[in-house]
Image: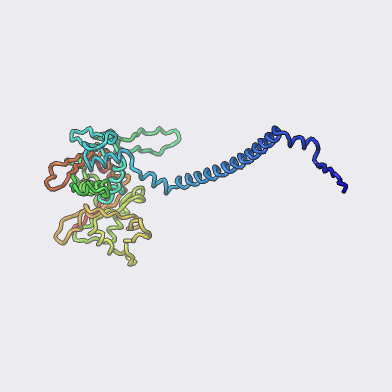
Amino acid sequence: MKHEVIEVRSALPIETREDNNDPLAAATAAVEELRTAAEQHRTQLDQRVTTETRALAERIAAMETRLNRPGNQQEQRNEPAIEQRAFNSFARYGVERMEAEEVRALTVSTDTAGGYLAPEQFINELDRNLVEFSPIRDVARVTPVSAGELLLPKRTGTMSATWGGETAPATSTQPVYDQQKVSIFELKCYVDVSNTLLEDAAFDLDNELAYDFAEEFGRAEGAAFINGDGTGKPKGLLETTGIEIIDNGAGLSLTADIMIDVYHALPTAYARRATWAMNRRTIGAVRKLKNVGGDYLWQDALSAGNPPTILGRPVVEMPDMDDLPDEAGEGMFPIVFGDFQSGFRIFDRKNLSVLRDPYSQQVNGLVRFHARRRVGGAVTKTEAFKILKITA
C-alpha cells in the first residue's frame, strides 16, 4: 500500500507562529492584558468614588439646610451656655464642688453682701416672669441703668410765639428746664429649696428659682410703683403730686358718664396711647356700665393675647390699685387712665445677685437662696395721667 504524506499548513502568518514559540512575547502580552484590566478597574473605582462623594455632599448640604431652619436654630440655642451651666451648678452643689471652668464663668458680685451675679439667660427669664406679678412693667418704659441715682431733664415751661407784622420785632422767649432725681432702691428676698430637689437632675432649678424670685420681686415692686411713699422704696403713682384728680362728686357712684369724662380729660397726644389701670374688684363694677344706648363700655378681646378695652383703650389689671369705697368709705382712687410709656419710668440695675446659704436651714433639709436687685421707678410726666376719685 502506498502511503501519502499530507502536509498541513497553518493559516497564521509565519511571524505569529514564531511569536507563539517566544516566551518573552507571551509574558509581554500577559502584562499588557493585566495593565489594561487594572486601568479599567481604576476607572470604574474612580467613577464610583465620585458618585458616592457627590451623594454624601448632597446629604450633608441637606442636613445643613435643615439645621439652619429657625426651629432647629432654636433647639441649638437651647443648649445652655457655660455661664448658665455654672450658675446651675452653683445653685445645686455650691462653689466648693464646682469644676474650675465653671467657677471661672461665675461673676462675683462686687456689692458688700457678696454672692454671684445671675447670668443673662436667668435675668431674661426673671424679667419675663416679673410681668405676671407686676403688670405695670408691661405698660411702663423699662430701662437698664448702671448708676445708683439718675437726674432726668424735665421741661417745666415752653416757648411762646406771638403774631406780628412784617417789620414788627419778635418777643424774646425760651423754654424752662429742670431736673428730676430718681433714686435706685434695693429689693431683696429669699427662697428655700429642699436638698432633694437640688439633687434631682430632672428638676428644672433655673426656671423654678426665676419664677419664685419674680413672684416676690413682682409683688413688692408692684405695690411700690402704685402706692410707694418714696422712703426706702420708689414713689408710687397714686402718691405723686401734680396728677390731675377727677372727682365723681360726693354721693355719686361709678357711672359710664364719669368714665367718659376721664377719657376726654386726658390730652389727645397721651389718650391715643393710654391704658386703663384698676384692680379686679373695680373691673367687675366697670363691666356692668352701659352708655345711653344700652351698650357696655367694656369690650372683651376679639382674639387671644389682646387685652379687653374700655372706650377703645386697653385695660390692665393692677391688684394694688384702690378698691371702690363702700357706703361709709372715704374718697378712694380706684382708676387711673394714662400713657404709661410716656409718663412712668422703671430703671433696672440688671445686677441680680444670689447668695447660697446651705447652713441656716439645713436642719429642715433646705438650702436658702438670698436674692437682691436694685430698681427704681417714678412718674416722669404728671400730665400723662388722670386719676378718678370715687367718694361714697
Is residue 271 positioned above or below 31 on the image?
A: below
Q: Position of residue 176 (x, y in %)?
A: 30, 35
Identified at 15% across, 58% down, the residue is 329
Quarter-wise, where is residue 302 in the image?
bottom left
Q: Position of residue 294 (x, y in %)?
A: 33, 67
Q: Nearer the viewer, residue 28 or 386?
A: 28
Q: Position of residue 131 (x, y in %)?
A: 28, 49
Q: Nearer the viewer, residue 140 or 161?
A: 140
Q: Which residue appears farthest toward the left when viewing the image?
A: 363
Q: Nearer the viewer, residue 139 or 381?
A: 139
Q: Nearer the viewer, residue 21 or 322?
A: 21
Regarding residue 237, the answer to whether it shows in the image is no
Q: Left or right: 262 with respect to 229? A: right
Regarding residue 54, the answer to whether it shows in the image is yes
The way the protein has been coloured in the rendering is rainbow
Identified at 47% across, 44% down, the residue is 64
Is residue 350 positioned above or below 249 on the image?
A: above
